[in-house]
Image (cartoon, rainbow, N blue to C red):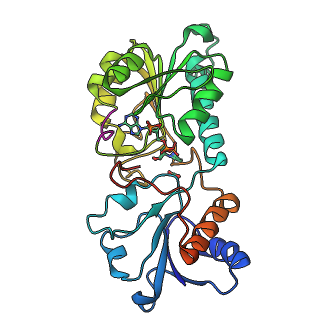
Amino acid sequence: MAVMYKCDVRNPEEWRVLLAAAIPDLDFRVWPDVGNPEEITAALVWEPVPGDLARYPNLGVILSVAAGVDNILSDPDLPDVPVCRIVDEYTGMFMAEYAAYYALRFHRHMYLYDENRRQKLWRKGPRTETQDRHVGVLGLGNVGRAVAAKLAGLGFPVTGWSRSPTVIDGIATASGTDGFAEVVAQSAILVNALPLTDETRHILNAATFARMPKGSFVINMGRGEHLVPADLMASLDSGQVERAALDVFEHEPLPQDDPLWSHPGIEVTPHIAAATNLRTASRQVIENLRRLETGEPFINAVDRARGY
Ligand code: NDP
Ligand code: OXD
């Protein structure tokens, strides 16, 4: 078995060491030095070059090193083999921390005090009770559930939105198009934890922002293409949206000349809401490499037709 590894944002040696500890004879090849393409039976990837995965005629599985698979499924020449992703409690935990940080920062208007401090201004800002600040969480998968639970634990009334009807203890839920309109209309803080699919692309747009209560907050930690940046900036300029935290962007790293960097209502982080925990994620990869050998069904396989 030879594994092709392609992930430009992580040192391949970290993966090589962890995988070799469990599979000592593993043939681990780092793209583009993959040798004979016919020998590759598994791919471990983040942002594979479109068309590249079709070069391996004996590929049996594509393993995402991350939770999201949009960067794999978008390949028009993707071979017809199972695609698996990482489903990890650490991802949920990190994402929930990110959402909690920005929810509290926005809820308590901490950004105003950053500016006041620079000006040596002793000025108190507005206060709203936590129970009166409704939060909407888009997506109720591994990430969305952890986010919703963490924010509810902080005292925010939380409603989560998913594609299929979902029941979660202590969290209000909604689904479908009507459910989306309802959730958005009550969300003083809207947190996006959706996967990027044809249905969810550009879901954070002018119509969505217009539906939210005036002066609300947006936290996007799904994917950059969930957002229409120009619509967000216009909504911030009009005061419809008060402030936004963006962790993900259509083009990463965010280009130097991108106006999102300098908009006064936007806080930019460099895709750090969560990072794959190699120690736990590698166990899932090792398990799927084992299943590739035995022919058992893979764990955490995505539904390619659904897009996540
Ligand atoms: P899951 O597949 O576990 O969950 C996806 C959720 O989104 C499900 O609840 C699903 O609904 C819902 N959903 C999908 N499509 C729709 C739709 N059209 N309408 C309504 N709901 C929909 O994914 P994860 O929770 O593991 O991850 C979500 C995303 O978070 C990833 O795809 C990735 O883009 C992003 N991410 C970002 C990170 C970062 O550092 N910024 C780190 C990790 C992930 P249903 O339950 O009905 O299927
Ligand atoms: C992921 C990510 O999808 O880090 O895991 O964005």
Q: Is 183 in front, or is 270?
A: 183
What residue is drawn where x is 57% and y is 21%?
171
Q: Position of residue 269 (x, y in %)?
A: 52, 43
- In the image, taking residue 222 as reference, residue 298 lies left or right, namely right
Q: Is 24 in front, or is 220?
A: 24
Vertically, is 7 above or below 214?
below
Q: Is 99 in front, or is 123?
A: 99
For the question of whether residue 290 can be seen, the reply is: yes
- In the image, taking residue 46 as reference, residue 116 lies left or right, namely right
Q: Image quadrant of residue 111?
A: top right
Find out whether residue 202 is within the magenta segment: yes
Q: Extreme right residue here?
A: 21
Total label count? Answer: 0
- In the image, taking residue 192 as reference, residue 233 lies left or right, namely left
- In the image, taking residue 213 as reference, residue 94 lies left or right, namely right
Vertically, is 86 above or below 296?
above
| The residue stretch that appears in magenta | 199-203
Q: Position of residue 93 (x, y in %)?
A: 66, 41
Vertically, is 211 above or below 49?
above
What residue is drawn where x is 54% and y is 26%?
167
Find out whether residue 198 is within the magenta segment: no
Q: Main secondary structure of the magenta part?
A: loop
Quadrant of the drawing holding the N terminus: bottom right
What residue is drawn where x is 36% and y is 50%?
307
What residue is drawn where x is 46% and y is 83%?
40
Q: Extreme bottom residue here?
A: 36
